[in-house]
Amino acid sequence: MPFFSGLSELWATVIVIAVLLIISAFFSMAETAMTAASRPRLHALARQGSRRARLVNEIRAQSERLIGTVLVGNNLVNILASALATSALIAVFGEVGVAYATAAMTVLVLVFAEILPKTYALNNPDRVAVILAPALRPLIALLNPVTRAFSAVVRTTLRIFGIHVKAELGSAESEQELRGAIELHKGPEPEIKEERKMLRSILDLDDVEVGQIMIHRKNVIMLDVDRPANEIEAQVLASPYTRLPLYRDEPDNVVGVLHAKAMLRALQAVGGDVSKVDILAIAAKPWFIPDTTSLLEQLRTFRERREHFALVVDEYGTLMGIVTLEDILEEIVGDIFDEHQAAVVGVRAQPDGSYLIDGSVPIRDLNREFDWELPDSEAATIAGLVLNEARRIPEVGQEFTFHRFRFSVLRRQRNQITLLRVQPPKRAAADRAA
């Protein structure tokens, strides 16, 4: 009888250990699934009405309690299972049972309570998370006093060493995480590349100033308000633009912005007699903005004011150029072009892998189109980058190497670089060819 009694106790211990390993596997699976599940997908499911997805998001929002519950529960059952196994094997084999228990439990815990459940959860994180969330929530509530006590000890210990734990990611860290997710959005389809460009550009709106994308004043068509009305009419009709700045005496003295439709309405009102039209009276008041305004702020202001056009000035009040709503939108979607045309105007690819680039081409357009990483914080155009890096006005024929790119000055007009040959790094060229 003692033999059968001991045998039944051994099997009871084995069953208890098996149950504890299953519970340990549950905690391991929950930990992996909750941390690896896709935040965007679960957020979308929650908005579509999925209660379990909403529950997962609520649990993950309390990350400290989640981790504490998983660690306490997992360690508790693993230690208990190991203690039971050691006790049982010592009773059967004597002192050598400690070694047997250590070896057996190491294998069982690693395979069935760690590697196997975590591997499955890692390959199906969203599915596992929504399945386990209802069972995990009451466990978090049950173990909350224990986890809070451990958290207090941990925080106090870290504070002694000058380490402060943040409850959640700050805005900078969240944006960095989102940028990383965008870079992972890859594939052979051309539309994926376009989507990645637009997503990058949207996040950059708050970091880019209007001075970097504005149309420079030398390329702006301006009208002298003191010229005869018939000359102004001819200029408006000949211009491809609908809004044109009006100046008096000098271009820096902008007194209004003339809209082509306003002039047509005025002509209709006076029977087509342009001499009766008061140009300044039908012009809109000029709206000046500093060149340091961010694109995100300017886009918001355009929407609030219901405006499409603004004049950009520097810190001294000097007119620098203009910016339109279309300019900001093109920063997001890019210029419209067909499949046989260069995406960036003023860029011509060469057979040797280099590019002939007009000096006025914006650096941001080049980075976005060719996946380059040229800095655009100190200069807006490719010519400005060369001037900034060279610290002098280069001569035609001079060559420079900056940021692993080779720049050759091909043409210069007075002090302005008008044409460059740019040789990108070989690795970047090889990646594009692939």
Image: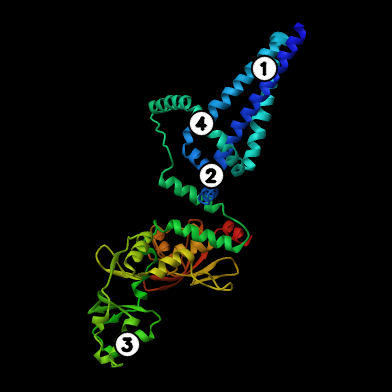
Residue at numbered disc 1? 85
Secondary element under disc 2, as helix, strand or loop, is: helix
Q: CA distance from mark 3 to mark 1?
A: 97 Å
Q: Nearer the viewer, residue 207 or 398?
A: 207
Q: Amino acid at mark 3?
A: Glu
Q: Nearer the viewer, residue 432 or 5?
A: 5
Q: CA distance from mark 2 to mark 3?
A: 64 Å
Q: Which mark is residue 51?
A: 2
Q: Is residue 211 above or below residue 44?
A: below
Query: Foreground mark, 4 or 2?
Result: 2
Query: Foreground mark, 3 or 1?
Result: 1
Q: Nearer the viewer, residue 306 or 205?
A: 306
Q: Amino acid at mark 4?
A: Ile
Residue at numbered disc 4? 140
Label 2 vs 1, first from the N-terminus:
2
Q: Nearer the viewer, residue 26 or 330?
A: 26
- The quadrant of the rendering that contains the C terminus is bottom right
Q: In the rendering, at what x and y percent does residue 105 appear?
A: 67, 22
